[in-house]
Amino acid sequence: MTIQVAVLIVAAGSGERAGGSIPKQYQMVAGKSLLEHSVSRFCSHPKVDTVQVVIHPDHLPYYQSIAALHDLPKPVPGGSTRQDSVRFGLAALSEQSPRFILIHDAARPFPSHALIDRILVALESHEAVIPVLPVNDTIKQISGNSVERTLDRSLLSMAQTPQGFHFAMISSLHQQFQNEPCTDDAMLAEKAGIIVATVAGEATLTKITYASDMEEVNRMMSGVVEHRVGMGFDTHRLIPHDPDSIKGKQSVILCGVHIPHDKKLEGHSDADVGYHALVDAMLGAIAAGDIGIHFPPTDPKWRGAYSSRFVVHALGLLKEKSATIQNIDLTFICEKPHISNHRDAMIKNISHLLNLDPSRINIKATTTEKMGFTGRGEGIAAQAVVSVRIG
Ligand code: CTP
Ligand code: MG
């Protein structure tokens, strides 16, 4: 299948210059490793179809926790130079043959969605696009300890990553020039006489090379990670099944699980009160209103819709805000049906929909001791709490 936009993150270096007991790309800043910061920024970008990471085989244990939280293809083992690592990564993507590729260094943890957008827009009209920053210091050419001359800094720019290319072009150049060392991928396009366009880079995207850079980025990010909570509540009325419904198939749908029951839930969609409470909690955590705003009951489009669609839509809104779900706690309030036998199936459904580890999802149920509408079996209520991390 042809995909539009692939990202290749090279993370196979050993981080010699940064030192520390674990390689720099796996060191933590603001709650995530450097590599996970860029993985999650690319994964949450709506235009990115796949993110391929190249890692050092010895680093697999560090990589596991990132793989568990993100939907990533198997990592590709890197080579002894950055250039080799990029070439191996491109080879792994050749079958999918994306239209555009963004090649990125794990050592630059904070590519913004706005920057990714700038590059993707420019790739529509250029074969190669790189982010650059102006040089603000006066630049001297030196020899030993003395200055040879002052360079005209207006002619100079600092190149960053991600660098964007038309995939077929950069793949074949990486093959062609594999024995000619280069320090970034745009150099290959330059060698081949291809025009490399520039877009504005970002000061926060500087590369982490030394331990002092890591300290600086820790200072910059301290307190930037934000934790938020959303809550959702929903009820649906229990009503008799349609007279023509097949007896053995009569059920209610809770968190996508069909549970046999002698009444059905009344509603415009599939009346999945569990998913509705979950969606409201997700929307609440990012101040995005409620389910009625996003899926108006008056819109015939949602008639009979499976509520899993609402959950997936809400997840997309969370991603736009760089919000990652930390955990979900969902409570059903009803006398019947009994929830406990179906908990695992519900957790599995939510885990699949949200790409969230089951250990972060809790489903529980309570009765109201036969009191009130739930106690009398007139309806089912559900409430959910979702906590998210932003950034
Ligand atoms: N890289 C890679 N494969 C290599 C060497 C580097 O994938 N054989 C990656 C690094 O993981 C990094 C990026 O290329 O994300 C830029 O390299 P650099 O900043 O030099 O990182 P390291 O090589 O890890 O650091 P050092 O040179 O200090 O050892
Ligand atoms: Mg290096």
Image (cartoon, rainbow, N blue to C red):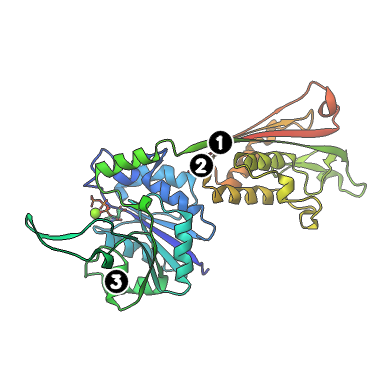
Q: Give the residue at mark 1.
A: 228
Name the spot of residue 207 as percent of width and height, x first. Answer: 31, 52
In this rendering, the label closer to the viewer, 3 or 1: 1
Give the image quarter of residue 301: bottom right
Asked whether the residues under the numbered discs 2 and 1 touch, taking CB atoms below 8 Å apart as contact, a structural biologist would say yes
Relative to residue 258, is residue 183 depicted above or below? Answer: below
Q: Give the residue at mark 3.
A: 188
Q: Residue at x 31, y 41 (%)?
A: 216
Q: Earlier in the sequence, mark 3 or mark 1?
A: 3
> From the viewer's perspective, is 45 left or right of 9?
right
Query: Residue lying farthest right?
Result: 243
Q: CA distance from mark 2 to mark 1?
A: 8 Å
Name the spot of residue 88 as percent of width and height, x first. Answer: 33, 63
Q: CA distance from mark 2 to mark 3?
A: 37 Å
Q: Give the residue at mark 2.
A: 390
Label 3's element? helix
Relative to residue 151, is residue 256 depicted above or below? Answer: above
Q: Residues within 10 Å of mark 3 (few under 14, many from 20)?
A: many
Name the spot of residue 234 as percent of width and height, x first. Answer: 75, 37
Q: Residue at x 24, y 57 (%)?
A: 80
What amino acid is found at the position of numbered circle 1 in the picture? Arg
Q: Earlier in the sequence, mark 2 or mark 3?
A: 3
Q: Earlier in the sequence, mark 2 or mark 1?
A: 1
Residue 30 visible: yes
Residue 28 visible: no
